[in-house]
Amino acid sequence: MKLSFKLITYMVILTVVLSAQVFAAGSNRAGTNAASELLIPVGARYIAMGGASASNVSGIDALYWNPAGLDRMPYMAAGQFSQMDYIADIGISYVGVGVKFGGIGSIGLSFKTLSFGDIAITTEDAPDGTGALFSPQFMTVGLSYSRGLTDRVAVGATMKIISETMDRVSATGFAFDIGAQYRDLGDIKGLNIGVVIKNLGSPMKFDGNGLLRQADPMDVDRPSSFYNVVAGADELPSTMEIGLGYSLNIGEANCVGVQTQFVNNNFDDDFTRVGLEYNFNNMVFLRGGYGLPLNNNKDVTGESTNIFGLTLGAGLKYKFGGVTLQIDYAYRAVTYFNANNVFSLELGF
């Protein structure tokens, strides 16, 4: 047990040290990162809890929130489908599957896509549209591995491939998530701690024939030619998240869980998150949460730059035969846009 506690302590310290340079500047660089879709959450359960997830998340939900929790899946195999109505009529579709392989750990695969619909192509000469349309295609594919080192300590990692295509330009990047969890901290049953670093990877930049421009060369006797505009490379929106959670059983049928989390962003405000979950007989779930920016930065109009507010949700789990079906819903209030509505369906075998 002492070895396990030392291990998690060293991992937390190492995480903080390695992240010191990555997360400098914070909100001073807001809006300048690549692949912002990496920050769009998936899965109704923890969205309903305000995103407070690092310490207690387990099973298929862990593929996005903290890969360390995947090996704590209560099934031998599980699959999840989630759909979100995001801002500006953007749809988020997500599919994840995970399988346990006994003592060697668990492996998971995830796919997240964004649906923008058809967008009119405009130019300087046709600001109202040329009559042509294009549909951006954003996709993230993740491969996760998790293993429980002891009954209390679990670690995990995810490798992600990020693909963005807009008309005739595209960009590709790679990112990694690394996480750890420790259960029953200080020998207090139900008190858990978790840490995860997300989206560490190489910068991304666009390329393609959409960046070709026709121009007359200077100081050269030749006709107009096509020149390639070299796009700049932008860093990924990395985060470091440390969470603490406590679950209290009340009688045989009731359980109340509270989770808090600190989120350090390298391109945005730092956040604290809190989430609550009431569990009745492991069948009916009620949830709520909130994220509070620590800096409370404001835009030029004096309004807060944080557009997301209160989150609420519910879930229902039912077992039939050797299959467990769980349906979850989340509501997230949004300023200026319609609220986010998230539905998730999970099957455990």
Image: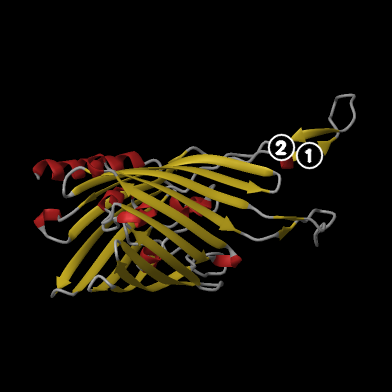
Q: Amino acid at mark 1?
A: Arg
Quadrant holding the C terminus = bottom left
The chosen color scheme is secondary structure
Image quadrant containing the N terminus = top left
Against 232, residue 121 (above or below) is: below
> What residue sits 32% from the left and 59% below the top?
53
Badge 2 crowding class, 10 Å Cα cut-off, few under 14, some 14 to 19, many 20 or more, is few
Number of numbered discs overlaid on the protein picture: 2
51 lies above or below 287:
above
Image position of 155 (left or right of 211): left
Residue 128 location, x and y as percent? 80, 62
Which residue position holds label 1?
213
The percent coordinates of residue 46 (x first, y second) are 36, 63
In the image: residue 338, left or right of residue 342: right
Q: Position of residue 250 (x, y in %)?
A: 15, 74
Residue found at x 24% / y 42%: 11
Residue 203 visible, this angle: yes
Q: Are marks 2 and 1 in contact (CB under 8 Å)?
A: yes
Horizontal relation, residue 231 to residue 29: left or right? right
| Disc 1 residue crowd, few under 14, some 14–19, many 20+, Cα 10 Å | few
Q: Residue at x 23, y 61 (%)?
A: 245
> Can see residue 204?
no
Residue picked out by circle 2: 229
Q: Amino acid at mark 2?
A: Val
297 lies left or right of 90: left
* Cα distance between the residues tagged 2 and 1: 7 Å
Where is residue 344, by image quadrant?
bottom left
What percent of the width, then of the height, locates residue 337?
A: 56, 72
SS of the residue under disc 1? strand
Regarding mark 2 in the picture, which secondary structure is present there?
A: loop
Of marks 2 and 1, which one's residue comes earlier in the chain?
1
